[in-house]
Image (cartoon, grey):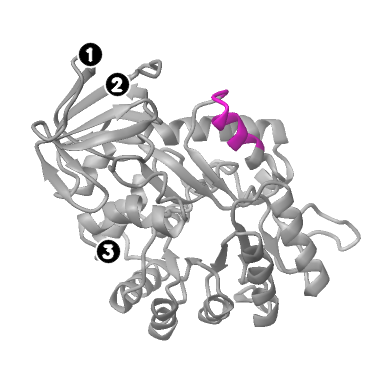
């Protein structure tokens, strides 16, 4: 792999092109500057004589993938528990990790990434986004939410003497004045989306229960929407998801306890789901589960059932794995599980490209191989529509017309 300067005009010649929706054999793609200039067969695309030709034999060219749920300022929980990362790791260390995480994510073929909370690292995601945009460090185009919003007393770290005010992994706020101020503060600090925790593990026995009332969630959505920001909601319970959907959030994250009724409502309202299958799978492995040896743990049995119900209801499925719980650069784990648990490979490819682009309101910039969009393109060995595992073999990455990696 190597870095290259932006070329004026490049003609990409793969075996096939996935345009974000459909696979096409024998297409070529012409890139001029930072944009896609033309796509189609060689006979249809009029490439200038001085265009640089990059041959990609046997490969599929496709839009750079879009990670829908990440935490760049976290690293795998089997390396350090969440509490330790939030309370003990210096911000400089966490930022250095995040810079590296952004780099490996880009090299894995993800050219856009929605990061859903810094988990105690303040507004550092805004600075990282700026550093990437200015070309100081390599990474995907970031969509950031900054601190996320939680109800007072519901989040963590927990378990300390009540005399001490322990730093939280998100911003606590409640009521009309508090929530309005928190949403506006995050927007003012650079949030592209607002994230809210509609439920969390704060029940009498540590179980997940709703946190905000429906009225509070509606207020969050109203204040965010007035500035043009969408809202994403963490919701593990059926009731938390129900309130979030009725409040008007645009994506629900996780939905572990979702029911057929939950997903019917989401489908009716057009609310998308980021299922984060890979995070649950990773946590089960951290707890000692051995796939193929041990019975599947109840948490994964329940997750399979909720995902199946979401598919049956026709809910729009985003590709978002909660990466950070597991290693950055391993984002494809989510896509492999989506395919293994019931989605066709072509539907998974769409989820990671054109669907995520539409849901995240960036389809006028990325997510498809179409003239006028940014030349964010990757090439992988073989045909990923025949097997998602092909996405583990990224051989070429271009972002904004610049060749980032070529192997």
Residue at the image point whose x is 60% and y is 42% from the top? 73
In the displayed structure image, the side of residue 158 where residue 405 appears, left or right? left
SS label for mark 2: strand
Main secondary structure found in the magenta portion:
helix
Q: At x 16% / y 28%, what residue is drawn?
A: 46
* 114 lies left or right of 315: right
Closest to the observer: 160 or 295? 160
The secondary structure type at the circle numbered 1 is loop
Residue with the most extreme bottom position: 261
Residue 30 coordinates in the image, percent (x, y): 24, 29
Q: Position of residue 280 (x, y in %)?
A: 44, 59
| Quarter of the image with the N terminus in it | top left
Is residue 101 among what the camera can see? yes
> Which residue of the protein is positioned furthest toward the right in this rendering?
163
| Element on which disc 3 rests | loop
Q: Is residue 368 left or right of residue 186?
A: left
Could you tell me which residue is drawn at 33 percent across and 56 percent down?
351
Q: Is residue 129 magenta?
A: yes
Residue 173's quadrant in the figure?
bottom right
In the picture shown, does residue 199 fall above or below 9? Answer: below
State the separation of the CA atoms marked 3 and 1. Answer: 47 Å
Magenta-drawn segment: 127-136
Q: CA distance from mark 2 to mark 3?
A: 41 Å
Nearer the viewer's eye, disc 3 or disc 1? 1
Q: Is residue 81 magenta?
A: no
Of labels 3 and 1, earlier in sequence is 1
Of residues 46 and 24, the one nearer the viewer is: 46
User: Residue 9, labelled with which disc?
Assistant: 2
Q: Residue furthest top?
A: 50
Q: Which mark is residue 104?
A: none
| Of callouts 2 and 1, the N-terminal one | 2
């Amino acid at each position: 792999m190597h870095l290259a300067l932006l070329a004026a005009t490049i003609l990409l010649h793969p075996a096939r092109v996935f345009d974000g929706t459909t696979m096409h054999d024998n297409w070529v793609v012409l890139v001029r500057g930072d944009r896609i200039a033309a796509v189609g067969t060689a006979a249809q695309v009029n490439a200038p004589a001085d265009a640089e030709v990059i041959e990609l034999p046997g490969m599929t060219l496709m839009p750079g993938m879009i990670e829908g749920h990440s935490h760049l300022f976290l690293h795998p929980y089997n390396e350090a528990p969440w509490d330790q990362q939030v309370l003990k790791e210096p911000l400089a260390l966490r930022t250095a990790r995040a810079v590296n995480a952004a780099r490996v994510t880009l090299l894995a073929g993800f050219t856009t990434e929605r990061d859903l909370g810094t988990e105690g690292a303040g507004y550092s995601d805004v600075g990282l986004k700026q550093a990437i945009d200015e070309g100081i460090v390599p990474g995907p185009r970031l969509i950031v939410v900054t601190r996320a919003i939680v109800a007072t007393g519901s989040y963590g770290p927990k378990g300390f003497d009540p005399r001490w005010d322990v730093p939280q992994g998100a911003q606590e706020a409640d009521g009309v004045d508090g929530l309005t101020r928190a949403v506006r503060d995050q927007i003012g600090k650079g949030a592209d989306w607002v994230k809210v925790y509609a439920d969390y593990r704060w029940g009498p026995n540590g179980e997940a229960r709703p946190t905000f009332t429906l009225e509070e969630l509606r207020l969050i959505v109203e204040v965010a929407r007035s500035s043009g920001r969408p809202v994403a909601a963490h919701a593990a319970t059926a009731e938390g998801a129900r309130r979030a959907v009725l409040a008007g959030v645009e994506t629900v994250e996780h939905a572990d306890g979702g029911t057929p009724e939950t997903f019917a409502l989401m489908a009716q309202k057009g609310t998308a789901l980021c299922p984060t299958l890979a995070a649950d799978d990773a946590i089960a492995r951290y707890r000692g589960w051995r796939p193929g040896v041990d019975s599947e743990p109840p948490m994964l049995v329940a997750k399979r059932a909720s995902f199946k119900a979401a598919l049956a209801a026709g809910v729009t499925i985003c590709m978002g794995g909660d990466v950070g719980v597991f290693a950055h650069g391993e984002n494809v784990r989510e896509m492999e599980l989506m395919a293994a648990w019931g989605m066709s490979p072509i539907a998974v490819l769409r989820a990671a490209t054109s669907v995520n682009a539409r849901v995240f309101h960036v389809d006028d910039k990325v997510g498809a191989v179409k003239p006028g969009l940014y030349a964010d393109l990757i090439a992988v060995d073989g045909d990923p529509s025949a097997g998602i595992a092909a996405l583990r073999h990224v051989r070429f990455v271009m972002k904004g017309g610049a060749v980032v990696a070529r192997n």
